[in-house]
């Protein structure tokens, strides 16, 4: 969709810290992380919100969330996760996305997406 920030990220017109991609989905680090490894998982096709997205695509995104949870437990040593999804006036970007937000038993400060991206690449 024209003028959609996340559609532009998928097309590579806007840079992102990509952590996953397949034919249906794309995942990248949130630019303003609430915790280290805060990730957005999105469909490549433009769906606006939870009312709009189809069931198969939603299930596919959830499977990616589960895979990332396992990876982040190992790579980032997080101890829990929050999965969030905003709709309506609290949804800033109108392209469906799941927030995967790791939590840590001990976290003093939040690293930049760049630092986490480098850590995940190792
Ligand atoms: P929401 O309120 O659920 O629509 O959240 C949108 C999220 O997208 C926020 O957490 C933003 O920090 C994030 N965001 C906005 N622009 C970018 C970008 N260029 N790259 C990565 N994340 C972004």
Image: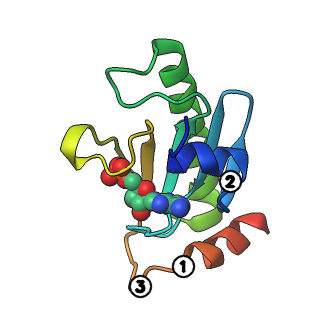
Residue at 46 percent across and 14 percent down: it is 55
The local crowd at label 2, few if under 14, some if 14 to 19, many if 20 or more residues have their Cα within 10 Å, is some
Element type where label 1 sits in the image: loop
Residue at 33 percent across and 41 percent down: it is 85
Q: Residue 32: image x %, image y %?
A: 43, 69
Mark number, residue 19: 2
Q: Residue 51: image x %, image y %?
A: 31, 21
Give the distance between the C-alpha atoms of the residues marked 1 and 2, in whole angstroms.
15 Å
The one of 88 and 25 positioned closer to us in this rendering: 88
Q: Earlier in the sequence, mark 2 or mark 3?
A: 2
Please name the residue that numbered disc 3 is placed on: 109
The local crowd at label 1, few if under 14, some if 14 to 19, many if 20 or more residues have their Cα within 10 Å, is some
The one of 27 and 77 positioned closer to us in this rendering: 27
Q: Is residue 17 above or below residue 98?
A: below
Ligand 1's quadrant is: bottom left
Element type where label 2 sits in the image: strand
Please name the residue that numbered disc 1 is placed on: 112
């Amino acid at each position: 969709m024209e003028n959609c920030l996340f559609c532009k990220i998928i097309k590579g017109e806007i840079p992102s810290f990509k952590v996953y991609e397949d034919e249906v989905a794309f995942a990248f680090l949130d630019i303003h992380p609430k915790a280290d490894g805060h990730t957005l998982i999105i469909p490549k096709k433009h769906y606006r919100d939870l009312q709009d997205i189809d069931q198969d695509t939603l299930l596919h995104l959830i499977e990616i969330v589960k895979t990332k949870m396992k990876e982040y437990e190992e790579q980032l040593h997080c101890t829990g996760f929050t999965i969030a999804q905003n709709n309506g006036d609290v949804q800033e970007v109108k392209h469906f996305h799941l927030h995967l937000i790791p939590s840590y038993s001990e976290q003093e400060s939040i690293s930049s997406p760049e630092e986490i991206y480098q850590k995940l690449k190792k």
